[in-house]
Amino acid sequence: MKVLILGSTPNAFAAALTLADAGHTVEIVETATVVGAPYVTQDGGEAGLAYPHFCPVLGKQWGITLPSLAHTGRSARRADGSWLHVRRSGLIGATEHDDKAWPHFMTLMGQAGELLYYLLQNPEPPAYLAEAWRELGRRQSMEVLRLPWMSLRDLLDEWFEDQALKGLLAEVALEGVAQGPFASGTAFHLIGRWANGQVLSPTSLPGGSGSLMASLQAALEGRPVQFHHVPGTPELAPDQRSLTVGTQAFEFDFLLSDKDARWTYTQLVNPRYLETEFNTAIRNIRGRGVWQRGLGRCAYPGDWPEQARLDLIHWEPGLIRLEKAWDRVKRNLDVEEGPLQLCWPGLLDESRPADLIQESFGYGSGWMGRGPLDVTDRKYFTPVDYERDWQFTQGHLFGGDRDLSQSFFLRPIADYQPPLDNLDLCGSSLHPADHTGRAGAWKAQELIRRFSQS
Amino acid sequence: MKHYDAIVIGGGHNGLVHAAYLAKAGRQVLVLERRHTVGGATITEEIHPGFKFLIGSYLISLLRPQVIQELELAKHGLELLPLESTLVPLTNGDYLADWPDHDMTRRELLRHSRRDAETYEEFSLTMRRLSLAMKPLLDLFPPDPTSLAPRDIEQMARIKGVLGHMQRKDFHTLCRLCTMSIADFLDEWFETQPLKAIKCTSGIIGTFMGVRSPGTGYVALHHYLGEIDGVRRSWAFPKGGTGAFAQSIANAAKAFGAEILENAPVHQVLIKHGAACGVVLEDGREFYADRVISNADAQRTFLKLVPKEHLPDDFLWDIQRFRSASPACKVNLALDGLPTFSAVPKGNEQLLRGSIEIAPSVDYLEQAYDDAKYGGWARKPFMDALIPSLLDPGMAPPGKHVMSLFVEYASSEIDWTPEKKAQFLEVVVDTLAEYSPDLKSKIIHKHIMTPHDIQEVFGITNGHIFHGELSLHQLLFLKPSPQWAQYKTPVRHLWMCGSSTHPGGCITGAPGRNAAMELLKDWSA
């Protein structure tokens, strides 16, 4: 079978490698202006997502080993100039109450995170999930069951008293999420981040996350996979047997779209050929990019603590600040003051410039550039760029919000059946909604089974 | 001193229902009510001479039909007057109305949007199927999912059966509705702002969440589970106000042999050898019984009435963190005559006989929430108004009227001084006057119950009308504490029967009834 894969996230590569290993001919074509979005490194800084995580099981299969550089943790600078450092080993600069609560909170989140990880690691809920849940014991299993439905405010108010700590954890959970911390179900995002280790030890790759792309491309060597980068607008031929980008045409027996579901079924496939009910469901997918990236030059301030050098730094975080910013964004108003995360990847990774500062501005462009530091040569990457240049609908880097109403069997839409015979999704629009390569590999395995039957 | 079989602390509607069921089963029951009359927040009071105010609850829909039948409430004076319509007046002079009669609503919607009128059919059918499927859960005793005890497994299987029998598509819709915000959900169906707003309101009643907060979808569904005389999703006004309804249950309870003692505020639950054995009143009187059942909310019961040393730390923490911040106020107006609404055309005054919603758009509702959520009040509040005297002329002197307004949002965290109360009352009246220009000139008396007043008068913690938020992490077997959701408590022989337990708030009678069934089963075992 000749399979064409549109897009180039790790999911596209995972699908390509799986199919190629099964003896199918694969072509990958990327039509965005860059290859590998959302993992794009420019001048050593991250333009999109910063902490790539490729499924280790798949990686081992194809000899992809990723050296990782772990940040030491996270820090928060409070409005009064004092600092809080959050480490796996404990909190530094926290109140006594929070210090005591932290290990218990870590245990609870670790347990919930582990269970969620089992769900994300498998296409269907594994049989041992119930057993693993029961093993937590009566009290703890109920605690875990409470978590996903809670709001971050409810959860964090129960555990901690320090606004900076609560705000920091909420900012981690809500990075890229179009909700405020007061909304029910937002605690689910924190478990998600906990499950992939992004809360306490976010890991980047030497040379930036773009180097993931290099490793994946290297893995294609010696396999019957061709890679094309043709920026432009792909057009599907009416007979659904070929895809044209500009002057180039690609023929296929089956097309896998690594682009998100909305993009695939509105831009690539003409909705006129699809059923109304399906179109409505696709249109109802919610996913709106709300965070933006700033890259610039600024040395690590001398009067900031040594301890925070290799951390991700949250600027005056707080639940109220976060919620107030969201209040503005949901009405499409500019934010005066929103969440801000800073880090200096060059201090962690010698191959990148030491004075490179990587900023994430939460919620709304009005807030960009008003940060506390004097940053020069700033370049911004906003959801508008992500949509226009990288072909992500509404600039959402995961193909749609990953809240409870759009996860698991409700993703990308409830009861999703590909409406066309020889076209399907293979990207983060599908469960488990990430760029670990799992969604691509699972979809490819499904296809291989289907091809062998017919 | 007489020894009772059971003492019920608090004569709210659930306490009375509970007592009636126990008495019906032949138990000697005593109900202790703090105030001068039973009913709790289900009460009618003559605050201004001649005018009967609904200072607490005001409408009935979720009341379980079993309760009416089994306690023979009709015989004891309950008379329900179904509401005929819902009206949303708009500032532009137009209005949108909604009737139980499907065709009338459809015609009305056609006036606003053809598309919405068409989707409305499917929407109603979908919601009807969802609520039909969910309804059995109201009468279920919540199982403990971690337990392997036969009855827990049986109940879990029953829940699974309830959900498993749904059509696949409905099940998915249910899952999405429960985890989405009501505004997002309705955006998928409708385009007319007032229609979306009117449907949104059921997602925020009594809940400190905004229409765009996920979780409000479930609250909306909760309000869809009601029925009056077999007509689903309809609301009714009890003749004589909700107080008369409480009296009818009290009469039923008495007829079955229960005793009711008023002006008897409970100071503490008496505990001997780790088991509840009675209560002591604030005036020192003591009453003894085999079982003590608290109709008070969980926080009042366990943080005030039960001495701390009898409760495990875990459980105490569960109760302390139980979310009960409340946004709801109740305003009553005594009126010199029927106010006119500029949106209601001459000759259409019968529209005022239903509920009147001040909810012109989804953004209006969301803004009201945003104003209040940091501990303030809405500058333009959402209101659910009712003119009970149009339905039951006995509520006001001839020619005069009373108006009952359910108002959101005003945070329970505000320090409610008399000045603040008066200020917020002004806000409410001013907002309403935008829709009814002659309202202010007709007001004889106005009265407000803030969350603080609800706490002081009815004894509900934070004045939360549902005894704690109806959010998903406080439902079913998580209500009020993950390990004690089966009406039992860590103190032997102390039980709960109030709205803090499954299935939660509103006038349902369900917690009272379910708890009685459980208690009786436990007793005979």
Image (cartoon, helix red, strand yellow):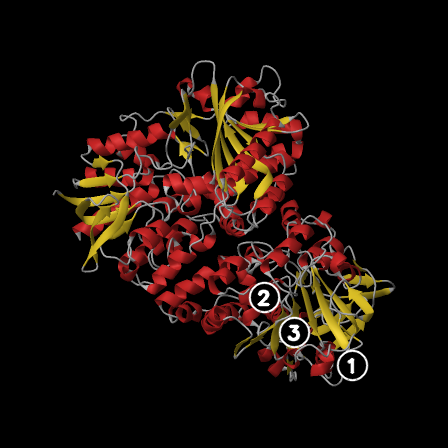
Q: If you read the primary sequence from the N terminus, does the residue marked by circle 3 or circle 2 appear first?
A: 2
Q: Nearer the viewer, mark 1 or mark 2?
A: 2
Q: Position of residue A189 (x, y in %)?
A: 56, 63
Q: Is residue A180 left or right of residue A363?
A: left
Residue A353, label in figure: 1
Side of B355 relative to B114 (left or right): left
Amino acid type at image mark 1: Pro
Going by the numbered disc 2, the residue's amino acid type is Ala
Toward which corner of the image does residue B321 lie, by quadrant? Answer: bottom left
Q: Are marks 3 and 2 on the same chain?
A: yes
- Asked whether residue A316 appears in the rendered view, the answer is yes
* Outermost right residue: A247
Marks 3/2: CA–CA distance: 14 Å
In the image: residue B419, left or right of residue A365:
left
Which kind of residue does numbered mark 3 sit on? Leu
Q: Position of residue B365 (x, y in %)?
A: 60, 40
Q: Badge 2: few (under 14), some or many (20 or more) residues near its Cα, within 10 Å?
A: many
Q: Which label's residue is closer to the chain start, 1 or 2? A: 2
**Which residue is labeled 3 in the image?**
A312
Question: In what element is the residue under mark 2?
Answer: helix
At 52% across and 80% down in the image, what residue appears?
A89
Q: Chain of mark 2?
A: A
Quarter of the view holding residue B147: bottom left
Badges 3 and 1, same chain:
yes
- The dot on residue B435 is none
Mark 1 and mark 2: span between their CA atoms?
A: 30 Å
Q: Is residue B381 above or below residue A298?
A: above
Q: What residue did someone put label 2 on? A: A164
